[in-house]
Each structure stands twice: as C-alpha cells, then as structure tokens.
Amino acid sequence: VSPASTCSCTALRAPAPTWATTTMQVTLRTVKGMDYKLDVQPADTVGGVLSRLEQQDSSLQGVKTQLVYVGRVLRNKAETMESLGVQDGDFIVLMILPKEASADAREGAASGVAAAAANRQEPLPPAAPPAAA
C-alpha cells in the first residue's frame, strides 16, 4: 500500500470558518470618536446593519450615513458581512454625512447667482489706439 492511499484527506481539509454560524461583535466608530457596539451575523447586509444602528440610536434616524470598512466605502446596501470579510472584533467607520440643501434652496441659490450675473455691468474694454497711417 502506498503512503498516498493511507492518507486521510479529511485531516488536510481546512476547518469550516467560525463566522459561518456565529454572532460577531463589531464596533461602528464615527470620525468624532463615538462608538456603537453591534452584534452582527455573517448574512447581515450593510443596509440591515445601518437599520439596526438607527434602532439603537434614534438620533441617527433620517440622517444620511455611510459605512467604510478597510478603506472601502460600502455603497452596496445588499452586501453581506461575510462577503466583506468582517470578523469578530473588527471596527467599521460610520460616516455621518452633511444634509444636502433642498431642491428649492438649490434652485433659489442658482437663480440668485444668475440674476446677480445678469445685473452686473462689466466695464467696456479700452478702445484700440487709432491705426498709424
């Protein structure tokens, strides 16, 4: 019998990842240093984590937020913690974005700029010297 035939292949298999079935605690940290601890599952999505965070802190409801993990802005709300490689004890940056001006305010500002430009009178350039004869 050759050594290869007596080898147990199960001994060479990597163990199943622990994140496949366990809850992980992650820290969401704002730029200002405020920390939120959340228990997440590997199947939890970015959108789900943001929703749970809003439930934990009602002052975040209606506020535009974004998560950043290992330098990458998480724009896809359907992406899972597992697909991102999030592990127990990791921290994710929570960016609280400034409120955007309403459409009316933007239109008002734009029309104000246009009106100011229309009312501004530019001085005429100096007249060209007469041509030498």
Image: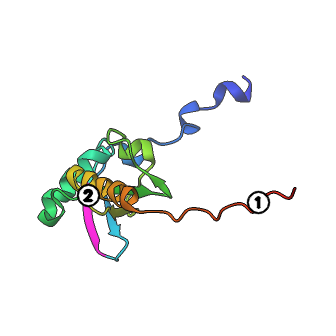
What is the CA distance from the residue labelled 2 to the residue labelled 1? Answer: 53 Å
In this view, the residue in front, 13 or 7, is 13
Locate residue 55: give its quadrant.
bottom left
Choose the circle earlier in sequence order: 2 or 1.
2
Q: Position of residue 16 (x, y in %)?
A: 44, 41
State which mark lies toward you, 2 or 1. Answer: 1
Label 1: how many residues lie within 10 Å, few (<14), some (14-19) or many (20+)?
A: few
Confirm whether the magenta stretch covers residue 49. Answer: no
> What kind of secondary structure does the magenta stretch mostly adopt?
strand
Point out the stretch of residues depicted in magenta. 34-39
Q: Position of residue 39 (x, y in %)?
A: 25, 57
The amino acid beneath tag 1 is: Pro
Which quadrant holds the N terminus? top right
Residue position for label 1:
130
In this view, the residue in front, 112 or 120, is 120
Please identify the residue farthest to the right as the structure is shown. Answer: 133
- Left or right: residue 49 compared with residue 61: right
Q: Position of residue 120 (x, y in %)?
A: 41, 63
Locate residue 64: give its quadrant.
bottom left
Q: Position of residue 118 (x, y in %)?
A: 38, 55
The structure residue drawn at horizontal position 49% and vertical position 63%, both measured from the top left corner, is: 122
In this view, the residue in front, 70 or 100, is 100
Residue position for label 2:
101
The amino acid beneath tag 2 is: Ala
The structure residue drawn at horizontal position 12% and vertical position 63%, both measured from the top left corner, is: 58
- Left or right: residue 76 compared with residue 106: right
Confirm whether the magenta stretch covers residue 37. Answer: yes
